[in-house]
Image: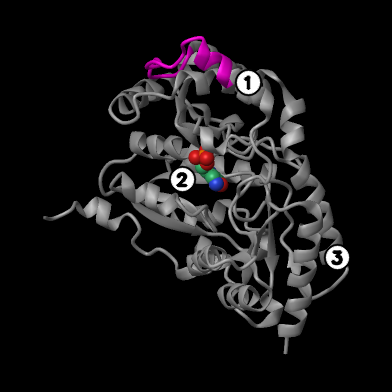
Amino acid sequence: MQLSKRILNLNAGGSDGWDVFYRARNMIADGVEVTELTIGEHDIRTHSKILNAMHEAAKAGHTGYAVVPGTNALRDTVAARLTERSGVPTTRDNVLITTGGQAALFAAHHAVLDEGDVALICDPYYATYPGTVRGVGATPRSVLTRPEAAFQPSFIDIAKQARGARSILVNTPNNPTGVVYAEETVNGIARACREYDLWCISDEVYDTQVWEGAHISPRTAEGMVERTLVVGSMSKSHAMTGSRVGWVAGPAEVVEHIINLSTHTTYGVPGYIQDAATFALNEGPGLEKEVGAPFERRREIGKRLVEAQNLVKLVPSGGAMYLMLDIRATGLSGEEFANQLLDAHHIAVMPGESFGEAAAGHVRVAMTVDDEAFERALSTVLSFAKEMTP
Ligand code: PMP
């Protein structure tokens, strides 16, 4: 039987850069001890306070179908949070609760793209971006960013690709680079959106993890409220990756249509998960700081180690749970480096090439093991780079 072209095409053009990840997983399954600095998952679990709230909500009976757009309490809480953080007045009608940020990314693209449309994505990009665009029948087109510009997309970078495109997906703080977009970058994105009449889908799932600089949402820039869909999530901010709860925020008329999409796909998010998310957000910034603190500490460890040598360079990151290392001085590709590192030292990092073209010759290090193990592993990565350099 013939499958749809859309599903067959979903992973088309996937990079081999994920080989090292699967190889590491196979080694672990074979009993080899591997230090995994690969995917963005905390080494702590969801806080027991949040679990208690979830448990209480479930016991109180919030286990039936929840209303599709999300509970009023959670939509109001998210709206108040967005208003407070961005200064853009946001109400319940601007917010739809989704099963995590990934479903929000899909819904946002589904809402603004027709079959065959072109959607811009900034390269390097989070692994699911091209597939998300293809999943709605559209075609991804890369905006190549440059290491010399800390991978921040400029107006010119975008303008080069913008003709005929309908949307641009941006991500600050950024995965894979950890870079926090400067005000100039955000203004350049906004200018490109206005001049080329693009929708802006702004992935802000790391907005609570900013260690240097400040998070600026493109939604706050001139003329952007009506054309921006913000993607948010509880996964990274509250270590709730497995709970699958996030949101899309944007113009009420867009949200209204995305509610229809939810009705025909997920039919909403479990009520007890939403109650736990409401509780967690109302705990305020203290809890978010606690969840993010290990990454802030490890980033300092990473900076210290990188500064103590002069071969490997650190992409000037300001947030998220990753460090992007420029290993071009070794003469190896990111893929060669990562594979050989895994063989020699059983340390798994992600090749820059697994996130598109722009980060070739780089590796992404997830700061997701305890401080001591992180320091040991990163020291080994740096001495390995030295060994491998002719
Ligand atoms: N966007 C980015 C940039 C991510 O790194 C992730 C998860 N790693 C997501 C979206 C999706 O997160 P979730 O679906 O867990 O909210």
Kindly identify the residue that appears in the image at 33 percent across and 61 percent down: 12
The amino acid beneath tag 3 is Glu
Q: Amino acid at mark 2?
A: Ile
- Residue 23 point in image, percent of width and height: 51, 69
Which of the two discs, 1 and 2, sits closer to the camera? Answer: 1
Give the residue number, with chain letter if any, for mark 2.
168
Mark 1 vs 2, N-terminal side: 1
295 in relation to 69, above or below: below
Q: CA distance from mark 1 to mark 2?
A: 39 Å
Q: Which residues are magenta?
A: 54-71
What is the three-letter code of the residue carrying label 1? Asn
Task: Please report the residue visible at 28 percent of the width from the left and 57 percent of the height from the top.
Answer: 9
Q: Which mark is residue 307?
A: 3
The residue to which callout 1 is attached is 52
* Residue 385 position (above or below residue 184): below
Query: Of discs 2 and 3, which sits in the foreground?
Result: 3
- List x then y, in percent, for residue 287: 73, 28
Q: Residue extending furthest left?
A: 1
Q: Quadrant of the C terminus?
A: bottom right
Foreground: disc 1 or disc 3: 1
User: Which residue is found at the position 47% from the left and 18% from the top?
Assistant: 271
Residue 57 inside the magenta-drawn segment? yes
- Residue 57 appearing in the image: yes
| Tag 2 near tag 3, CB within 8 Å | no
Q: Secondary structure at mark 3?
A: helix
Judged by its main secondary structure, the magenta piece is loop
Q: Can residue 212 be seen by looking at this rendering?
A: no
Is 16 drawn above or below residue 386 in the view shown?
above
